[in-house]
Amino acid sequence: MATAVIDQPTVRSEPTLVDSLMSVRRRITVEEYHRIVDAGVFGPEPRVELLEGVIVEKMTKKPPHIIATDLLADLLHHLVPRGGGYFVTMGNPVTIEDRDGEPEPDAGVYRGHIRDVAVRPRTPAEAALLAEVSDTSYAYDRHAKWVTYAAARVPVYWIVDIHRRRLEVHTEPTGEGEAAVYSRTQILGPDDEMALVLDGREVGRFTVREILP
């Protein structure tokens, strides 16, 4: 998307912000990413996110993805105790400055209260759980985002795998940078029961099919 914008013929006396940031192949920072988005390069409602210093176009959401996301939202809002020191957010960015990233997970459970982050970004240090709903994006969610979230020490990462009709639960992040991994993975089928665990405390249980379309 960005290359097409840069290549459009136009008359200008000096390089623009986007020209200067994208004229060389390199990672960009979160600050630079915000400046590009604020400049309107990707339109009024950008469908992009920043991952490992690279601007990535987000997949178009198809009905199964939308349904699974809505089911996940309903489940989390039901199970996460109100006033219990956590809040649920859907499809909003988490800023990972030391990884040059600002991915937008489909769901997140954060410590604290919503107004705590009214004027600042949400960070992985506050995330108790992040979740992605995977339709056509499974390889992306299972590799690039998996490494990014593990490196940022997000303690629990869920992948709702629509095609295989299963839930992957990744925990115990370890390692640094590109070598970061989740050392424990559970794969649960539609009829399996799962506990929602936040910071080592079980707050509810559900059956995996409750979040599958």
Image: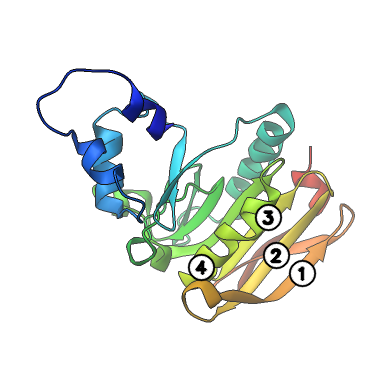
- Decide which of tag 3 and tag 2 comes sooner along the chain: 3
Foreground: 134 or 144?
A: 144
Dot 2 amino acid type = Val
Kindly check if marks 4 and 1 are in contact, taking CB atoms under 8 A apart as contact. Answer: no
Q: Secondary structure at mark 4?
A: loop
Question: Real-space Cα distance between discs 4 and 3?
Answer: 13 Å
Question: Real-space Cα distance between discs 1 and 3?
Answer: 11 Å
Mark linked to residue 54: none
Say which residue label 4 marks. 154
Foreground: 196 or 120?
A: 120
Question: Real-space Cα distance between discs 3 and 2?
Answer: 7 Å
Q: Residues within 10 Å of mark 4 (few under 14, many from 20)?
A: many
Residue 153 visible at all: no
Kindly check if marks 1 and 2 are in contact, taking CB atoms under 8 A apart as contact. Answer: yes
- Decide which of tag 1 and tag 2 comes sooner along the chain: 2
Question: Real-space Cα distance between discs 4 and 2?
Answer: 12 Å
Residue 212 in the image: above or below residue 15 = below
Dot 4 amino acid type = Val
**Residue at the right extreme of this rendering:** 191
Q: Which residue is painted at 24% across and 37% down in the image? A: 19
Q: Residues within 10 Å of mark 1 (few under 14, many from 20)?
A: few
Say which residue label 1 marks. 186
- Decide which of tag 4 and tag 2 comes sooner along the chain: 4
Question: Real-space Cα distance between discs 4 and 1?
Answer: 16 Å
Q: Which residue is painted at 23% across and 18% down in the image? A: 10
Mark linked to residue 169: 2
Residue 14 in the image: above or below residue 105 = above
- Decide which of tag 1 and tag 3 comes sooner along the chain: 3
Q: Which residue is painted at 78% across and 44% down in the image? A: 162
Say which residue label 3 marks. 159
- Residue 3 screen position, x and y as percent: 39, 33
Location of residue 98 by image quarter: bottom left
